[in-house]
Image (cartoon, rainbow, N blue to C red):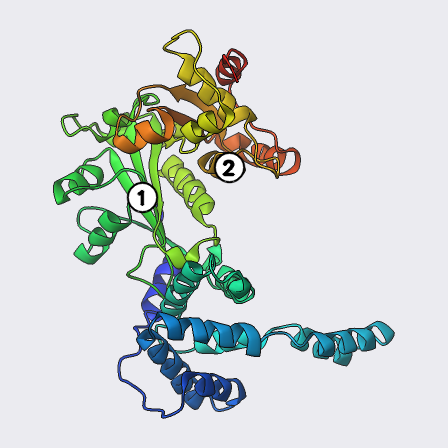
């Protein structure tokens, strides 16, 4: 069993704030209520106004939601002229008074509004859902990105790692949580309750999730773990319904085979790296027989890259696709110099290294379409994680085993 976070569990109990229940009557339009909240000084009245805003927002149709975000974006924006004036004053006299004035003016009123709205019971989850709605509008209304920036700024503070609680999800967990694990699984679909039980109940299977005290029944992100002997080379061996479970104490490898973000409204608020490292540390403590921590990961951008580059397998070599996958992971770069593959960026940025590549590892429709069935193991070598993270962030260096580097060098590339 994982080491428990007693403080986190206590916070979960104390801060289990349910969404606002009764409807609070206020005849004003939502814009007017927002302006009223910004000037309200009484704490009780302010919480009532915040609840009113969130209740009203939930009732809005798409067009009215757009109008609401336009109001936040335009009417509660920064006053650039005022900031310039105060910056000049601070430049001439850097007194604490001038600093406070400049600092206060540099915070958009919409950010103040969101902070005040978060005082209502259940507001954090509502603001996460509000941000999900905003993300769906950004492609056609990119100017609303200013408001999105402010929400993300606050969410990164509210969902700081120090507030998050790790919980193990097992077959005895509440049905409401288990249903969400099925719904949110984003890598390997969970088709039935029997399928879910195979992932949670056996002694050699684990699932861990991050929760936030203000959203105690909503997993933020979860990782599924298989305890094995040796590093697996296909997802079939991990998910097979016919395999025999082993005792956890007999395993020597922990395999992170699926990690799923659950809240679309928290896109860009990263805590997956913290979850994997926390689980690895706790498993290492509780199961000292575990020596290796690896993933079994998809390579979602491989086939798209091969098509875009006009790269073809050479000579009918059955191992050609493994070589091309190695070259893709080590050499294909985005404009910022980081790996083109999103999954690779995530794990390498966390301090992992490219350990091994396997063909015919995922023969699902998605696996074939994305990577011709190829999967990759990323190795989390605990003593080297910090060094690998620094090398990747500062030098954009991709850590990999000599066997993977050899595969990349031998890739047959034809344009």
Q: Position of residue 259 (x, y in %)?
A: 36, 42
Residue annotated with mark 2: 345
Q: Position of residue 178 (x, y in %)?
A: 21, 51
Q: Position of residue 323 (x, y in %)?
A: 46, 16
Helix, strand or loop at disc 2?
helix
Hey, which quadrant is residue 200 in on the image? Answer: top left
Residue annotated with mark 1: 186
| Front position in the image: 46 or 160 | 46
Closer to the chain start, of discs 2 and 1, is: 1
| Front position in the image: 28 or 116 | 28
Query: How dense is the environment of label 2, judged by Cα within 10 Å: few (below 14), some, or many (20 and up)?
Result: some
Q: Is residue 37 above or below residue 144?
A: below
Q: Position of residue 299 (x, y in %)?
A: 41, 30
Q: CA distance from mark 2 to mark 1?
A: 18 Å
Q: Is residue 274 above or below residue 67?
A: above
Hey, which quadrant is residue 82 in on the image? Answer: bottom right
Residue 118 visible in the snapshot: no
């Amino acid at each position: 069993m994982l080491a428990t976070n007693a403080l986190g569990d206590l916070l979960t109990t104390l801060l289990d704030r349910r969404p606002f229940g009764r409807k609070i009557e206020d005849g004003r339009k939502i814009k007017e209520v927002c302006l009223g909240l910004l000037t309200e000084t009484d704490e009780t009245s302010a919480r009532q106004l915040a609840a009113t805003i969130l209740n009203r927002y939930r009732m809005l149709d798409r067009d009215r939601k757009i109008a609401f975000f336009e109001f936040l974006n335009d009417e509660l924006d920064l006053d650039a002229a005022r900031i310039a004036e105060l910056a000049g004053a601070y430049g001439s006299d850097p007194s604490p008074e001038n600093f406070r004035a400049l600092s206060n003016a540099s915070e958009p009123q919409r950010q103040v509004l969101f902070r005040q709205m978060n005082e209502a019971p259940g507001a954090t989850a509502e603001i996460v859902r509000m941000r999900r709605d905003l993300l769906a509008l950004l492609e056609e209304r990119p100017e609303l990105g200013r408001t999105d920036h402010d929400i993300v700024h606050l969410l990164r503070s509210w969902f700081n790692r120090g507030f998050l609680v790790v919980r193990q999800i097992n077959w005895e967990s509440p049905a409401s949580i288990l249903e969400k694990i099925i719904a949110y699984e984003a890598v390997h679909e969970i088709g039935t309750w029997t399928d879910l039980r195979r992932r949670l109940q056996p002694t050699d299977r684990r699932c861990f999730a991050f929760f936030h005290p203000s959203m105690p029944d909503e997993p933020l992100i979860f990782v599924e773990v298989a305890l094995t002997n040796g590093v697996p080379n296909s997802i079939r061996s991990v998910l097979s319904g016919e395999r025999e479970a082993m005792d956890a104490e007999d395993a020597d490898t922990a395999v992170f085979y699926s990690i799923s973000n659950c809240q679309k409204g928290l896109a860009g608020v990263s805590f997956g790296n913290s979850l994997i490292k926390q689980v690895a540390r706790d498993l290492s403590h509780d199961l000292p027989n575990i020596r290796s921590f690896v993933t079994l990961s998809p390579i979602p951008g491989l086939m798209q890259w091969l098509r875009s580059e006009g790269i073809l397998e050479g000579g009918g070599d059955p191992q050609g696709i493994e070589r091309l996958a190695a070259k893709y992971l080590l050499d294909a770069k985005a404009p910022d110099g980081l790996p083109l593959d999103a999954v690779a960026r995530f794990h390498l940025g966390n301090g992992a290294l490219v350990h091994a590549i396997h063909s015919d590892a995922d023969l699902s429709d998605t696996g074939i379409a994305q990577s011709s069935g190829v999967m990759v193991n990323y190795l989390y070598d605990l003593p080297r994680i910090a060094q690998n993270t620094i090398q990747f962030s500062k030098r954009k260096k991709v850590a990999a085993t000599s066997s993977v580097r050899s595969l990349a060098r031998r890739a047959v590339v034809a344009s």
